Image (cartoon, helix red, strand yellow):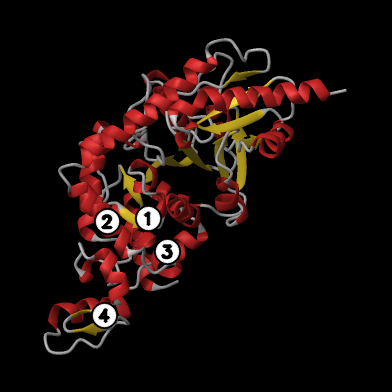
Amino acid sequence: MHPLAQQLNETIRKENPHLHEMLSDLGKLIYFPKEGILSQSAEAKAKAKKFNATIGTALENGAPMHLKVIQDTLSAYNPKDIYEYAPPAGKPELRTAWRAKMLEENPSLQGKQVGNPIATNALTHGLSIVADLFADPGDAVIIPDKNWENYELTFGIRRGAEIVNYPLYNEQRKFNAAGLQEAILAQKDKGKAIVVLNFPNNPTGYTPLAEEGRSIVAAIQAGAEAGINIVAVTDDAYFGLFFENSLQESLAGQLADLHPRVLSVKVDGATKEEYVWGFRVGFITYVGQPDATLAALEQKTTGIIRATISSGPHPSQTFVLHALQSPDFQTQKAEKFQIMKGRANKVKELLDTGKFDDVWEYYPFNSGYFMCLKLKNVDAETLRQHLLNQYGVGTIALGATDLRVAFSCIEEANLEELFNTIYQGVLDLVKVAP
């Protein structure tokens, strides 16, 4: 094992031996090199005033070399802010700005030990880093039965972890905290679990109410008190899109300092929050640990980034930073929020008319981009294909009964036609059924 990795491991073990036990084999081995091209280049950038021949970029007239056909479309930006490599941990000014935004929007994080967010290549990359650092073959990754399919690839296929499901809703159509707790306690023999909390949920668009949030925290605490080390990951991809009286902030703050056996990891990003899907800018932040432990975790995270993508895209990080610093940012974001809220409310208004009750019910939703129909008498995949081929309407089939509808990408004026068409598709299939 490299001495730097040993040093990081010893720091973590000294501060919290339970956290050291959470690390995967790769997580224990990884480190960020302090000696090498990046560190020597950084030293040269500070001291080499005459010639700096250290790193693989090209300069011309004292600025990063670039093509006019590209710069003409980016003329508002200084070449140094888009063409140079971003640091592996991300643009420092962006990390600072995102941390300030995160603290402002999540009051429960205030007063806690909050690390400096590390820039990732969007949310999936952040989750992949969590998987690399904490998931070994056979480790339990606990997610609800209604989940984003990429968790299986990220944790299961890539790292060999065991996916453990529990029903998202209980009989009262609320978040199933009891089911979560049962799934956690079932890992007592393993002594470790990775719990992924995704709110607003993809695919259902559900965010728990405050009381349900407290039940979730209590379920995780019960697992920790039973001797289970828990990596609690809040996948906040759709953060801020809360349209009703649900939790209005991430659970990462409540999970911080909860128990020595609980590590709170917040994964979020500009992707959906700021409507910049193609920019691929996300963040991973460690919460509720001593400064030395936070620094060690950030070094290991940066090591994973260096070993995989080296660093994220500089231009999109600059664009996001520019937006966060703009005096018009909050106003423009609020305008888009109202559009999204209007679409969600319109969907609920349509579904609550009773017109469609003979063919489906809908799962509770109050946030995010999506909602899910629970079909009563047709197969979801059969309906999906029929809608696509007969009406040119695209939806997502999930299992035998569930059909996900993304109201985020449908204008409010077109939502009634959309659901009438889905309804007609069901009637078509019922009519031809033997």
Q: Position of residue 68 (x, y in %)?
A: 28, 75
How far apart are labels 1 and 3 at the CA level? 21 Å
Q: Nearer the viewer, mark 3 or mark 2?
A: 2
The residue where tag 3 is placed is 304
Viewer-nearest of labels 1 and 3?
1
Q: Earlier in the sequence, mark 3 or mark 4?
A: 4
Of pointers 4 and 1, the one earlier in the residue sequence: 4
The answer to whether any part of residue 207 appears in the image is no
- Quadrant showing the N terminus: bottom left
Spatial CA distance of label 3 from label 4 is 29 Å
Under mark 1, the amino acid is Phe
CA distance separating discs 3 and 2 = 24 Å
Looking at numbered disc 3 in the image, what kind of residue is underneath it? Ile
Question: Looking at the figure, which quarter contains the C terminus?
Answer: top right
Q: Is residue 205 above or below residue 59?
A: above
- The disc labelled 2 sits on which kind of residue? Phe
User: Disc 4 versus disc 2: distance between alpha carbons?
Assistant: 20 Å
What residue does disc 4 label?
A: 65
Question: Marks 4 and 1: CB-CB under 8 Å?
Answer: no
Disc 4 or 2, which lies upstream in sequence?
4
Q: Nearer the viewer, residue 433 or 99?
A: 433
Other-residue count near label 3 (Cα within 10 Å), few / some / many at <14 / 14–19 / ≥20: many
Q: Quick one: label 1 or label 2, which is nearer the N terminus?
A: 1
- Tell me the distance, in whole angstroms, between the alpha carbons under discs 4 and 1: 22 Å
Q: Is residue 365 visible?
A: yes
Q: Quadrant of residue 225?
A: top left
